[in-house]
Amino acid sequence: MGAATLFDKIWESHVVRDNGDGTVLLYIDRHLVHEVTSPQAFEGLRLAGRRVRHPEVVFAVPDHNVPTRDRHLGIRDPIARLQVETLDGNCRDFGIVQFGMEDRRQGVVHVMAPEQGVTLPGLTLVCGDSHTATHGAFAALAFGVGTSEVEHVLATQTLLQKRPKTLLIRVDGALPAGSTAKDLILAIIGRIGTAGGTGFAIEFAGEAISALSMEGRMTVCNMAIEAGARAGMVGVDAKTLAYLKDRPLSPKGEMWERAVGQWRRLVSDPGARFDRVIELNAGLVAPQVTWGTSPEMVVPVDGRVPDPQAEADPVRRGSMLKALEYMGLSAGTPITGIAVDKVFIGSCTNGRLEDLEAAAALLGGRRVASSVKLAMVVPGSGLVKAEAERRGLHRVFLEAGFEWRDPGCSMCLAMNDDVLAAGERCASTSNRNFEGRQGAGGRTHLVSPAMAAAAAVAGHFVDIRQGMG
Amino acid sequence: MEPLRVVTAIVAPLDRANVDTDAIIPKQFLKSIRRSGFGPNLFDEWRYRDRGEPGRSNEGRPENPDFVLNRSRYRGAGILLARDNFGCGSSREHAPWALLDYGFRVIIAPSFADIFFNNCFKNGILPVRLEGGVVDRLFRETEATEGYRLTVDLERQEVITPGGEALAFEVDPFRRHCLLEGLDDIGLTLQHLGAIEAFEARRRQEAPWAFL
Ligand code: SF4
């Protein structure tokens, strides 16, 4: 075999059968399940009298619908409760391990799995959730699937797949102070658009990616889907191995050594051919803020809300006009002049320890502005929460006036009680600013954790590179 | 799954790019543990003036008269005409379930988001990709002519306009076959159980840590 990409290596090693029509039957090593996209899949299995082929590689966690406070009181919304109870019942009936609501390992599925060592290099991993791309940070081929595919994987441990094309995004240089992995991925999406990666598996590489922590790499891969790509991935290096060593489900002892021997090869070979290559200089990435209703509608914090009249393409101009109307913004407004009502720090994009540390560091004893109605931190998992508390971060947040909640998806998609009211504006560390995403009529601006914390303190967006003023 | 061969139906034009799955079926309806009954809440936030809730009847809710599906000329539409990147965002299969439950069997757009595209085929919906210029023209014709209908013939891979013009489209042969026959993917895959078992035996040797 000639020079191969990271993607090629994982793909080739998982082909069960080539159907000869452009599709293959691809083997799936790990399967993550949550309460929202799985009930109909289990129902399908029952109706057809099928069993789960390998329940031991399936891991379930309720995250989308769970309350983030007073958890001991259970879920009040009867429909959400039924969904979580349905997951309990399905895990019991089909022999699947679940990290339930009371388990300290519970959390957003994409935060939980890497922590547990469920995610390993060279594996294929799926979940009925589009942000499954997150796990690609570990040189795994990970992507989101629909509920029919969840059922297909449960029954057969395989998926019918068409080979995507490969896109290399090489980011050289160093991120300037104040800019983070979140700003980098937002800048990439701003450049290539929300459909720029459609049909591709993206590999992120280059100096700036190597310099990121595993958490930062997860943030970048997490939002590959926001660029239209189902999978984002990063090659194995020493940081990958250091993160995985001694995780509960990582291989141990001699098996670890053997695995590492193979994992070290999980990088693209020099000279490997990609279908498309995009190069970026990290040095030019400023802190980013989205202004519209699609993640590609993003500008640097020192920029202004763009003017639709300057857009030549009529369809794009139409979307911009609709977005401005929905967001209640007018063209030309400086980003730092936009006031926020709520602040949400959390999600599978930015709900890990490093994210909470960055936000807490920015707070440094300051308080949330009185104009801000609610500022909340929702740790990505119970383990993130426990570790943050061990380091005293919760005190920094509480003293600043933030609420310190229990783990879950929370206001990332507002399926539980954590929602924006119509017209409310939120600085959010999540990944989607679609209409109604955080509550009907709610207005979402995507930012990094430090930028969100700064907005909480100032009551509006601030350019954190200029200090807090 | 209901087979799909030829669909002739009223066309509803949804003139927006990047319609995401949150817009197709808002998140509160994802709490359901069933796969049917989502049709009345398709595009809920655009379709109604109030907020829909799961388990609540849609009778008597105030409609937004400007929304395309509420205009009398598009009632009963079975083909949705859309713009670029239709179905982007979350992977929720509730989006195709809602479209299907409403009565759409075909969606025509210049491009679709990957997961959504895939989910359509699994649920008996045919997503048809036509070139941007052609879609533009169909938008103009649909809006100009009340009762505008298209025929989509999957067997011949053609969209046929009222004027009799045939617009060819591409579709993956396997997906086409499954849709034409209404075949269940899992049953088909289980016919290759031997290949799956052989693969697992080999992989257990090469990467034992992949198994738990
Ligand atoms: S945190 Fe948000 S993006 Fe992540 S899995 Fe939950 S809902 Fe999806």
Image (spheres, coloured by chain):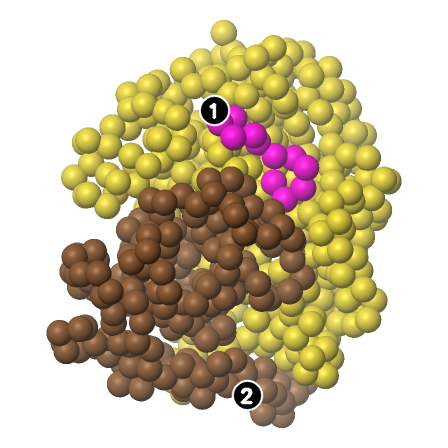
Chain colours: A yellow, B brown
Check disc 1 and report the residue beneath it: A177
Q: Are marks 1 and 2 on the same chain?
A: no
| Residue neighbourhood size for the residue with mark 1, other residues' Cα within 10 Å, grouped as few (<14), some (14–19), many (≥20) | few
Percent of width and height locating residue A405:
74, 32
Most foreground residue, A193 or B139: B139
Name the quadrant containing residue B74. Answer: bottom left
Q: Give the structural element (helix, strand or loop) at label 1.
A: loop
In the image, is residue A56 above or below residue A353? Answer: below
Q: Give the structural element (helix, strand or loop) at label 2.
A: helix
Tag 2: amino acid: Leu
Check disc 2 and report the residue beneath it: B188
Q: Determine the residue positioned at 68% across, 83% down.
A: A48
In the image, is residue A297 above or below residue A305? Answer: below
Highlighted range, magenta: A414-425
Q: Chain of mark 1?
A: A
Q: Determine the residue positioned at 26% across, 85% down.
A: B156
Q: In the figure, is residue B146 to the left or right of A275?
A: left
| Residue neighbourhood size for the residue with mark 2, other residues' Cα within 10 Å, grouped as few (<14), some (14–19), many (≥20) | few
Percent of width and height locating residue A179:
47, 29
